[in-house]
Image (cartoon, grey):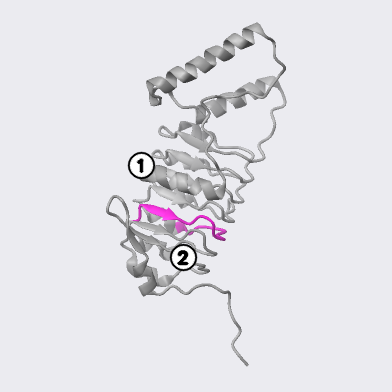
């Protein structure tokens, strides 16, 4: 009788891993094991823990071990599109990390460790396409955060602490079951909150872009004063709404991360 077969998945050897190291544009060493059909975290890569970037995206990995803390030089960690239900507490020791992408997994709020708030140098955090029904208010401690993806989860509210992040420029929380405002006053408050999180500041626009936006705004105001129009959903010309589909969103985030 033959042995019972376990889950199918490609076995990564140290030789395969070494051959998968690439040099990034800034001279860093990137270990790219994406789209390899991996089902378990390959222990052999712990011998390559001095790399600057680790890409394990688009696999079938269900668990990240606590030994991830061996990668102390890591600046970029991409785990999107796997089957992760939680992250290890030891991820909070990766103090050099500025990019963390765990979108399109099965992460629950319980599986998101409090230690993630220890990543003081984190610039980009993508938690989209998961099973999160709440976000810890302590994320407000990530003062270097520029972008955060919360799209396609089960969130009903966003912690006020995120409003106070000094460097946050983009927050994508599309397609969450936020409660619908019950009256006009609540609707206005909701709009103000969204503007605070999403609108581009004038100082970040070039002169031509600023003029274009102002011309559109003047044209809208003129039209509104001349011809009454039926009620319509508020529109914000300056609203930043990045594409949150798994395929297109990841490349955009990587490019932005490299530019920071």
Outermost residue, top side: 226
Which quadrant would the C terminus be assigned to in this image? top left
Marked residue nearer the N-terminal end (1 or 2): 2
Q: Which residue is mark 2?
A: 65
Question: In the rendered structure, are the residues bearing label 1 and label 2 in contact, judged by CB atoms less than 8 Å apart?
Answer: no
- Prevalent SS, magenta region: loop
| 88 magenta-colored | yes
Would residue 80 be seen by someone viewing this image from the given angle?
yes
Find residue 233 and report its image quarter: top right
Q: Which residue is mark 1?
A: 259
Please give the range of residues in magenta: 74-89
Q: Is residue 245 above or below residue 222?
A: below
- Residue 36: x and y, percent? 48, 66
Number of residues whose C-alpha sits closer than 10 Å to that of mark 1, classed few (under 14), some (14–19) or many (20 or more) = few
Number of residues whose C-alpha sits closer than 10 Å to that of mark 2, classed few (under 14), some (14–19) or many (20 or more) = some
Outermost residue, bottom side: 1
Would residue 127 be seen by someone viewing this image from the given angle?
no
Q: Nearer the viewer, residue 122 or 147?
A: 147
């Amino acid at each position: 009788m033959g042995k019972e077969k376990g889950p199918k998945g490609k076995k990564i050897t140290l030789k395969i891993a070494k051959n998968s190291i690439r040099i990034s544009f800034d001279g860093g060493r990137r270990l790219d094991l994406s789209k390899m059909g991996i089902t378990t975290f390959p222990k052999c890569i712990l011998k390559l823990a001095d790399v600057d970037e680790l890409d394990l995206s688009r696999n079938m990995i269900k668990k990240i071990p606590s030994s991830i803390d061996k990668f102390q030089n890591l600046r970029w960690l991409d785990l999107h599109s796997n089957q992760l239900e939680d992250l290890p507490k030891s991820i909070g020791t990766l103090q050099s990390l500025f990019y963390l992408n765990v979108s399109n997994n099965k992460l629950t709020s319980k599986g998101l460790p409090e230690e993630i708030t220890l990543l003081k140098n984190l610039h980009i955090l993508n938690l989209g396409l998961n099973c999160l029904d709440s976000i810890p208010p302590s994320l407000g401690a990530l003062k270097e955060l520029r972008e955060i993806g919360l799209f396609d989860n089960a969130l009903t509210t966003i912690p006020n602490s995120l409003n106070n992040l000094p460097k946050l420029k983009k927050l994508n929380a599309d397609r969450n079951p936020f409660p619908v405002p019950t009256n006009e006053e609540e609707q206005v408050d909701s709009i103000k909150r969204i503007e605070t999180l999403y609108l581009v500041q004038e100082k970040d626009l070039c002169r031509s872009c600023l003029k274009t936006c102002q011309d559109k705004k003047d044209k809208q105001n003129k039209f509104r004063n001349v011809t009454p129009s039926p009620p319509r959903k508020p529109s914000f010309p300056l609203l930043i709404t990045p594409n949150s589909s798994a395929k297109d969103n990841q490349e955009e985030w990587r490019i932005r991360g490299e530019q920071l």
